[in-house]
Amino acid sequence: MIDFDLTEEQRLLEQSVREWAAREVAPKVHDLDREHRFDRGILPQMADLGLLGCSVPAEYGGSGMDYISLGVISEELEYVDTSLRVIMSVHAGLNCLSLLTWGSEDQKRRYLVPQAQGRKIATYGLTEPAAGSDVRGIQTVAVKKGDRYLLSGEKMWISLADVADNFLVFAWSDLDKKKQRDPSGISAFIVERAFKGFSSGTLKEKWGILAGNTGFFKMDDVEVPADNLLGRPGEGFKIAMFALDQGRFTVAAGATGLIRACRDASVRYAKERKAFGVEIAQHQLVKEMIAQMESDYQAARLLWLRAGYLKNHGRRNTRETGLAKWFATVASERAAGDCVQVHGANGYSDEYPAGRFYRNCKGAVIYEGTREIHKLMQADYVLGYRADKATRCELPPYQEKVNQ
Ligand SMILES: Cc1cc2nc3c(=O)[nH]c(=O)nc-3n(C[C@H](O)[C@H](O)[C@H](O)COP(=O)(O)OP(=O)(O)OC[C@H]3O[C@@H](n4cnc5c(N)ncnc54)[C@H](O)[C@@H]3O)c2cc1C
């Protein structure tokens, strides 16, 4: 049976996040964006609402919500501000869900619990100055010394780099495999900002998601206890890909919220603005842009709902999540471009939100798999070059609580 309705609980969540974001966030968004300022004060509020631990079961300090709820939150947050949804993507999606799935009991107690409670903020460090799409091109290394690893390298374009306390970091722990570019030589580590040799900074020249923090971090022989290895040695690449399946889901739902924001702003403006004696909404070519936004919104929403459904049932969903992310982000770029267009010259001014939507939508077409990488993936599934494991769950066998 297919049920397109949200449950009563999910509907109430949607309503409460929507009301909170409209009341607490929307009035500040314009100024934060203009001042390029990340509002740290929003984090305790998100923690109080249970948003930061939404994807984590109550036994690990979270609010134990399902994937559809995570999607609902992501969509509602990005409807108001992309930088808020980014927090959900890196903290709740990429990081917490990886710790929940791959972490030892001890790691969950030490790291997942404070993160789910919002006492610690976490992010994900894969990209480097010379390697983004080409994950095997990363240069960061982890050299084992007794009961520790020494991590050295630099990560770039990291969301919340200057805000987060904990970082999920990927590094080559097998240097022979690094030479051969064999991904089974990559391991994943939990790194604390407090570890000696760790430093970070904010990227100042970024032109989108200006109310969000994006930066770099450097590790200079950072001593990481062997207990902070996530999964087994050599499982880092798999963990990185698993994490992206979670992050991409929040990006897909978030971009869906951005399309809705573009649609609503366009509808408002098109009914206010007059040209040739009638409101511009009466002109068929303006209607066409609004109709496209509506069809993109509805299709994007169905795609993330399907991915969330598969996740809730513990089913493999890389293909469906990738499609949802690709479609929604590309459609959000189209919607934001047309939102500016509907606003005419006013869309070219920061007095209206259209310009911010236009700057904010582009990041998601680049991160968590660029448009081109997703195109290739979808083509390869259809062509049979990439196995479609949609009904097989490939999660670690030693982890009993998976994708609940
Ligand atoms: C705002 C923002 C936030 C980010 N946050 C994070 C984060 O929190 N953590 C993190 O680890 N990373 C983060 N990233 C980095 C992001 O994941 C990378 O930018 C992305 O993976 C692309 O890598 P790249 O920039 O090195 O581009 P490249 O990989 O160099 O690609 C450049 C261009 O070449 C194309 N290309 C590359 N390879 C192929 C191919 N095989 N076939 C066809 N085309 C190809 C790409 O599609 C793209 O158009 C963030 C990026 C941005 C913009």
Image (spheres, helix red, strand yellow):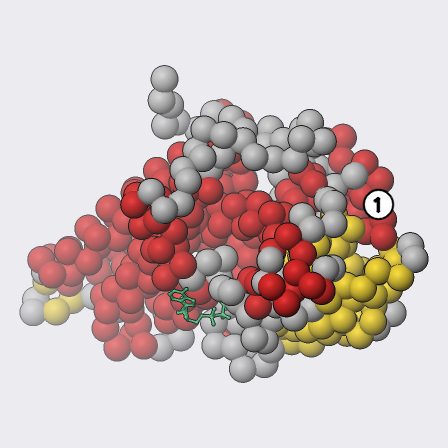
Residue furthest to the top in view is: 1
Q: Is mark 1 within 8 Å of ligand 1?
A: no
State the image quarter where residue 281 is shown.
bottom left
Provide residue 304's location: percent of width, then percent of height: 41, 41
Q: Is residue 216 left or right of residue 318?
A: right
Say which quadrant the N terminus sits in. Answer: top left
**Residue at image coords 35%, 38%:** 302
**Mark 1 neighbour class, 10 Å CA radius: few under 14, some 14 to 19, many 20 or more:** few
User: x%, y% of residue 282?
Assistant: 11, 57
Q: In which quadrant of the rendered view does residue 192 lie?
A: bottom right
Amino acid type at image mark 1: Arg
Could you tell me residue 249's position as x and y percent?
Answer: 48, 45
One can see residue 325 in this view: yes
Depth order, front residue of 221/260:
221
The answer, for residue 66, to whether it is visible in the render is no
Judging depth in this view, the residue of 386 and 323 nearest the camera is: 386
Which residue in the protein does label 1 denote?
110
The residue at the point 37 percent across, 23 percent down is 3
Measured as percent of width and height from the top left, residue 204 is found at 59, 81
Residue farthest right in this picture: 146
Residue found at the far bottom of this picture: 205
Asked if residue 108 lies left or right of residue 73, the reply is right
| Front residue of this view, candidates 7 and 225 | 225
Relative to 10, say whether 160 is above or below. Answer: below
Residue 108, image quadrant: top right
SS of the residue at dot 1?
Answer: helix
Residue at image location 78% in from the left, 51% down from the top: 229
What residue is rendered at 69% in x and 76% in y?
201
